[in-house]
Amino acid sequence: MIKKLVAVLVSMILLGCSGDKGKQNSKGNLGKNIKISEIKPEKITKLNISSGVTEPLNEVKVVTKTGGTVKQINFKNGDKVKKNQIVIVLEDQEVQSAYLKAQAAYISNEADFEIKKKSYEKFKQLYDKHLISEDEYLVKRTNYLQSEGSLKTSEATYLAAKKDYEDLVVRAKLDGVVTDLDLKLYEKIAPNSDLVTIVDDSKILVKTGVSVHEISELAVGNRAEIDLEGITNNYFGNVYEINPVANKDNKRYQIKVEIDNPEGKIKKGMYSKVLVETGNKNGYLVPKNAIVIKELYSYIFVVEDGEAKRIKVERGYSNDDKQEIISDELYSNMKLVTEGQFLLEDRDKVNILN
């Protein structure tokens, strides 16, 4: 009986010791391991991200008014040309004939005008001295004015015919690259047909749009980054033009970004992603991987009094690998959890690792 009582007491003592040890282990647990960083308010560059299409800053499309037969082609698509170089030569007998006739008529009317002008001036002097009658003077004056009108009419006809004739020789209007040339020698070209386009690709524009909330802070000269389809390296440019009237369909304001293109790698019609700086603001930026998504909401964890506190945040502007977060609970020098946050629950004990 005494042996049984001693055995029960020993068992109770061992169980008690075991329970105390369990409680110590529980109290000795330092929590979940995490890493933190302190964040402070900083200047955030606001960016508008949109898509755009490239176009040359300057280009000239040549359209033939008269048409004609292709007599000469000096360049092909992709060739570089200098201003005033001859690109195409057309031939048209009717245009040449009209030019020569107009030229002859103009020369004849010019000579007739000079004769009648001198006669009028002579008779005017006589009339002023009362040496001839008013009727004689008025006849000379009428002849002079009619001759002047005929000269001006023939000059207009001559200048138009001359331009048509000179336009048979198509010259580059600027330094650039030949594009949209699709002609063959001796091909008959109809009037008002497109012949060729000369593109100055030293500077490129990208057309895109911004919202009504961003237009007020946008200005000509604002910096922009352009990610072009098919080109590895991004380009940087500046806002060149802002349309103050919104597009009636999408309610966005069109802007154009200018990019230097010294090597000619950017081509007309390339699609691109455009990041335009629309201003600055103060706010909190955190690493994007510090944000936890749960049930479609965004959260961060901060450390307060040795515990993890979960804060619901809204997303603002994105700058590279950092994300602006917005919440009334944010404060300066907050201890943001940057590693281990995906294993945390609100009010978990934490162990901060160096």
Image (cartoon, rainbow, N blue to C red):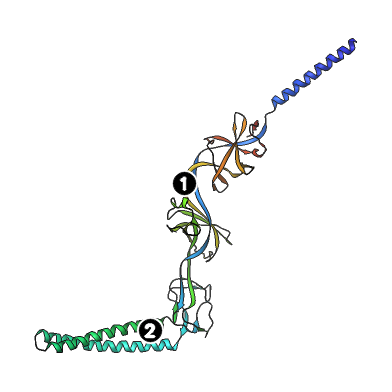
Residue found at the very far front of the displayed protein: 248
Q: Residue furthest right?
A: 1
Which residue lies under the disc numbered 2?
Answer: 161
- Residue at position x 42%, y 80% in the image: 167
**Where in the figure is residue 257, as x and y percent of width and height?**
47, 59
Residue at (34, 87) in percent of width and height: 103
Left or right side of 9 for 354: left
**Residue that lies at the very extreme toward the left in this rendered image:** 130
Binning the other alpha carbons within 10 Å of mark 1 as few (below 14), some (14 to 19) or many (20 upward) gives few
For label 2, count other residues whose C-alpha is less than 10 Å away and answer few (under 14), some (14-19) or many (20+).
many
From the viewer's perspective, is residue 266 above or below residue 17?
below
Q: Position of residue 195 (x, y in %)?
A: 49, 77
* Type of the residue with mark 2: Ala
Name the residue type under label 1: Asn
Q: Helix, strand or loop at disc 1? A: strand
Which residue is label 1 attached to? Answer: 280
Could you say where residue 282 lies in the image, as x and y percent from the top left?
48, 42
**In the rendered image of this protein, does residue 76 appear above or below residue 36?**
below
The reply to whether callout 1 and callout 2 are in contact (CB within 8 Å) is no
User: Which quadrant holds the C terminus?
Assistant: top right
User: Quadrant location of residue 306?
Assistant: top right
- Which of the labelled discs sits on residue 206, or is there none? none
Q: Is residue 19 above or below residue 102?
A: above
Quadrant occupied by the N terminus: top right
The residue closer to the viewer here, 353 or 267, is 267
Give me the C-alpha separation between circle 1 and circle 2. 59 Å
Tell me where residue 21 appears, x and y as whole percent: 75, 22
Q: Earlier in the sequence, mark 1 or mark 2?
A: 2
Counting every numbered tag in the picture gives 2
Q: Quadrant of residue 124?
A: bottom left
Q: Is residue 254 left or right of residue 133?
A: right
| SS under mark 2 | helix
